[in-house]
Image (cartoon, rainbow, N blue to C red):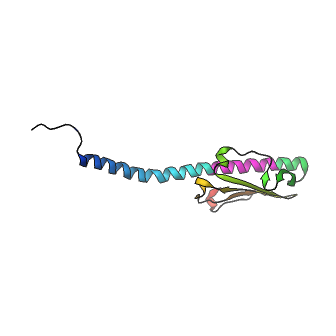
Amino acid sequence: MNRQPGFTLIEVMIAVAIIAILASIAYPSYSDYVQDSRRQVAKQTLIEGAQRLERYYAQNLNFSGAVSGSTLTLISPSSDFSDYYTLTATAAANTFTLSAAPKGAQASDECGTLTIANTNQTTGSLSSCW
């Protein structure tokens, strides 16, 4: 009897099952890593906006001129930020608040909306978000 070289169906099914198990373990970790990296971009954008507002205040002695409606006019967020977060700003003469609300693929982020205020107080849904 001649035996043909190759894999049996059982061997192929076992290999596919092992790959599926490894993928089911690795994918959630990868998704968490991607969300965390997007959150880092959002925090960086909020900090940059707060720094620009403080610089504006040093020159103009108020924050209110730096915000038009709910748009911060001092920075143009990158597409890495804009694709996954919405930046909103509120400002009065001596106070400001910047917020980054997640959207799209980032909407399921456990940290929710990230904010920073003129007092350097930062908030998120969890204390570990900042």
Q: Residue furthest right?
A: 60
Horizontally, residue 107 falls left or right of residue 78, namely left
Q: Please identify the quadrant where the C terminus is shown.
A: bottom right
Horizontally, residue 70 falls left or right of residue 104, namely right
Callout count:
0
> Looking at the picture, how far across and down is residue 50, in whole percent?
77, 51
Horizontally, residue 87 falls left or right of residue 10, namely right
Q: Residue furthest left?
A: 1
What secondary structure characterizes most of the magenta part?
A: helix
Q: Residue furthest bottom?
A: 125
Res 118 seen here: no
Horizontally, residue 128 falls left or right of residue 122, namely left
> Looking at the picture, how far across and down is residue 21, in whole percent?
37, 52
Q: Relative to 73, does residue 1 appear above or below in the rendering? A: above
51 vs 77, nearest the viewer: 77
Res 37 seen here: yes
Q: Residue at x 57, y 52 (%)?
A: 35
104 vs 93, nearest the viewer: 104
Residue 91 included in the magenta stretch of the image: no
> Looking at the picture, how far across and down is residue 8, in whole percent?
22, 45
Q: Residue at x 14, y 38 (%)?
A: 3
Q: Residue at x 72, y 51 (%)?
A: 46
> Looking at the picture, how far across and down is residue 109, in whole percent?
59, 57
Q: Please identify the quadrant where the N terminus is shown.
A: top left
Please provide the residue range marked out in magenta: 39-53
